Image: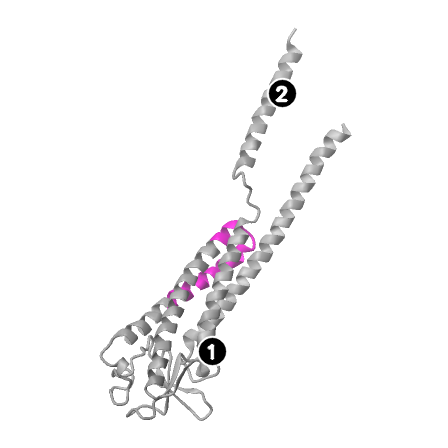
Amino acid sequence: MDGATSEPLGREEEKWREMGTVAVERVGLGFLGLFFTASALLLMFLAFLGGARNSNPLNIIYWLEADTGNIPGAPALSRWTYWQLCAVNSQGKNECGKSYPDYPFDPPSHRNFGTDVNVPSAFIGTNHYFLTSRFMFPFHIIALFFATCSLFTGFLAMCTRIGNWVSAFSAYIALTFQAITTCLMTAVYVQGRNKFNNNGQSAHLGSKAFAFMWTSVALLFFSCVIYCMGGAVGRKDGGYSGREQRRRGFFSSRRSGSLRSNKETAP
């Protein structure tokens, strides 16, 4: 009798121990995914808001800086951001005027310098740089929206499997649009830097903005993978076999009980 009762107790204890291990793993993975998502969001917002205000640290974030002193009406040094074409003060900080969202990179147009004089010829007569830089802004907003959704659902990821899968899905969409934005950024501003340098006008990329954008892509990738791992924790290979087994066990016990009673009542 003692052996029969100790066996179910042992299985019950093992079951509770397994549940505790799964809970710890899920909380750990959920917290790690949440940390990576929050870090990515911080970098994405810093890159997004660079140049929006003349305050630290936004006044040191930009996509491209070029020597434009020989272009009529242009500042000695010009920096392009999402919000404005900015000059550079004596401290090496952005000096931006009124902010305009989705500010394009299009040197000869009225939106930038409004002249073709001393502007690299590769920028003249093409919409390539204008369109590529314009598409960055809406894609970045979409990435920020889904990354924010992933951040909030990430709190549920520490408790439930469905929270992990929802967070992973949101992080995946954010990763997709952030990767597109970063690739567009890299393509248009690397080309722009090369065109300025080839024209004898020194130019270089904004290291902080580029570092923030590419690092956020990597962080979103890691968070997506970690959330998927959290969703897989505690999943049984047999799917709903446990439920089916319980159902079979219930009916089989009823049948076995009825058979025993029939045998006892039989003459």
| Camera-side residue of 155 and 167 | 167
Kindly indicate the quadrant of the structure image that contains residue 58: bottom left
> For the residue carrying disc 2, how many other residues have a C-alpha within 10 Å: few (<14), some (14-19), or many (20+)?
few
First-in-chain label (1 vs 2)? 1
Q: Label 1 belongs to which residue? A: 208
Q: In this view, does 121 lie to the left or right of 168?
A: left
Q: Which amino acid does label 2 sit on?
A: Gly
Q: Is 215 one of the magenta-colored residues?
A: no
User: What's the residue type where badge 1 is placed?
Assistant: Lys
Q: What residue did someone put label 2 on?
A: 257
Residue 82 in view of the camera: no
Q: Where is residue 187 in the image (x, y as percent from the top left)?
A: 36, 72
Q: Is residue 263 above or below residue 136?
A: above
Give the image location of residue 228, x and y in percent: 51, 53
- Residue 106: where, in percent of width, then height? 29, 80
Magenta segment boundaries in residue numbering: 140-165
For the residues carrying marks 1 and 2, which lies nearer the camera in this image?
A: 1
Q: In this view, does 29 lie to the left or right of 169?
A: right
